[in-house]
Image (cartoon, rainbow, N blue to C red):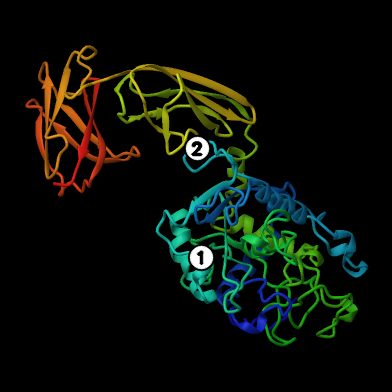
Amino acid sequence: MKLKNTVLALALGITSLLDAQTGMRRCATDAPTKEWDEWFNQRVVEFKANEILLKKAQAGATIPVVVHILHGGQNVGVYPNITSTQVQSQITVLNQDYAGNGLNVNQVPTAFAALKANTGVSFCLAMLDPTGTPLAEPGIDRVNYVSKGWSNPNSYNTSSSFMNFMDGTVKPATIWDPNRYLNIWISDVSQNQNVGILGYASFPAGSTLSGIPGSNAGSANNDGVWVYTRAFGNTGFVNAPYNKGRTATHEIGHWLGLRHIWGDGTTCSNNTDYCNDTPPQLSEHYGCPTYPQVSCSNSAAGGDMFMNFMDYSDDGCLYMFTNDQNTRIQTALTFGTFRKNLSASSATLCNIPNETPSASFNMVTEGCIDSVITVDENLSLGVPAPTYSWTSNPPGVTFLPSNTASLPTMTFPQAGTYTVTLNAVNVAGNSTSDMTITIADCGPEAGLRELNKVLKGVRLVPNPAYSSLTIDLQIQRPSQADVAIYNAVGQKVYTNTLQESGKTTIDLASAGLSVGIYTVEIRASGEVLHAKLILAQP
């Protein structure tokens, strides 16, 4: 709706915008500043006047996506730690909606049929993380807020406090380079009517001039989109009437420079979304309106375009962008700081051919009964990244935290020779790799004397230990030795380096070691010794 008055609305975090049916607000994206509108609108003019840019836009753009799934430690498939199937369903919806062939598109009124746009924009789940490592689940980054020490997202009782938590804590700690990825965060959110939002987005940034763009334009720490997990995709944990994936379609519209269809104003004279082909409209719509709906004397133009993705109608009743909206989308992809390189980035992040796994790992080849053996390196390759399973022959080896971890620790129940096998699997196939380790009964003075040429043994005095511990090595020739102490679950809790004397005394309280069973590991000149240590109450 093209109007001369550019007065902007207040932020949309007010309870009057609640959907009476659900208690949820479709969108909490604030209206941008006047300076941002002026800057972006000038870029639109430049875009429309440049034939080269217009031809480039006609070729289409592909945007790599990473979805950060915020959860509290639940297993995959337990809400809110949703499956990859639900994530993929959202990508499918986006690709259909932005191509102009999504759900119910055949219901576009005749008055608007010629205005419906195929934006040429498509979305793909990134197959590589920022380091170039293949992802086991393309486009998915699972973030456990408990292990991060963060609050439960649904513990916030206002939309502003929730959004401050997301923008100030979650996003800066988890964002992937916004020049290469569209970052989407999904999480639970309180159903309190003071919160109750479905999504919000950052507008495209594009200039460092003072006052431009607005304060809600994306930065390197927060650029992207947040969506309520129960409104993400069209399968799995989704709630009607926001169960068709249109919340993400709407919010990514903002992320690509689109204003709300009614322009966020309060009267017909100050509502504008800066698009000539969207009829002037008084306000947003909820539910599933019956066509036509008329406001702002727009009957000749076809009435309110409540089926436009930038309105607030229910998911099943949203099904179009317009040609002028597409011009703004292409402008954002051309000039936006965190938008203009995304399609080029997709060439290296998306549609990478699958590669059969190649399993490989490194670990020591000697150890003691009940000592903790750590897999030093998992060198397996494959696209997408493989998943893993570890086994032993003979059986009985304990793998921690599980036998599906990338780098587990192992304890062995008795002396003998074991074959440890890694099986790496992805959609292209599987591969196995074996290593053999000899486990000895190392006795009270632990050490693999018959196996090592430099490290002849280690004495732990006293053992059990109480307040202090002396580690005394028998080293055949001068050598630097690295000492590490592991707790019962394989976590490294102490490190030190011993020089030629091969002897050190540890104040156990100062070292932070508590009562329990530990494994002392000594490494020197490529050799390894392990000894069991018991810390007891005095």
> Would you identify the image quadrant in which residue 499 lies?
top left
Q: From this viewpoint, is residue 221 visible?
A: no
Marker disc for residue 436? none
Judge from the rendering whether residue 41 lies leftward or rightward of residue 365; answer left or right.
Answer: right
Marker disc for residue 132? 2
- Count residues near mark 1 (Cα–Cα under 10 Å), then give few for <14, some for 14-19, many for 20+: many
Marks 2 and 1 in Cβ contact (< 8 Å): no
Q: Quadrant of the N terminus?
A: bottom right
Q: Amino acid at mark 1?
A: Pro
**In the structure shown, which secondary structural element does the residue marked by tag 2 occupy?**
loop
Which sits earlier in the primary sequence, circle 2 or circle 1?
A: 2
> Would you identify the image quadrant in which residue 16 lies?
bottom right
Q: Position of residue 438 (x, y in %)?
A: 34, 16
**Residue with the mark numbered 1:** 153
Please, which residue is most extreme toward the front here? 538
| Of residues 515 and 449, the one drawn nearer to the viewer in this rendering | 515
Q: What residue do we see at 51% from left, 27% from top?
A: 381
Q: Amino acid at mark 2?
A: Gly
- How many marks do you count on the picture? 2
- Count residues near mark 2 (Cα–Cα under 10 Å), then give few for <14, some for 14-19, many for 20+: few
Q: Position of residue 12 (x, y in %)?
A: 61, 78
Q: What residue do we see at 80% from left, 59% from top?
A: 117
Q: From this viewpoint, is residue 195 visible?
A: yes
| Of residues 530 and 380, the one drawn nearer to the viewer in this rendering | 530
Judge from the rendering whether residue 148 lies leftward or rightward of residue 537; answer left or right.
Answer: right
| Of residues 38 and 132, the one drawn nearer to the viewer in this rendering | 132
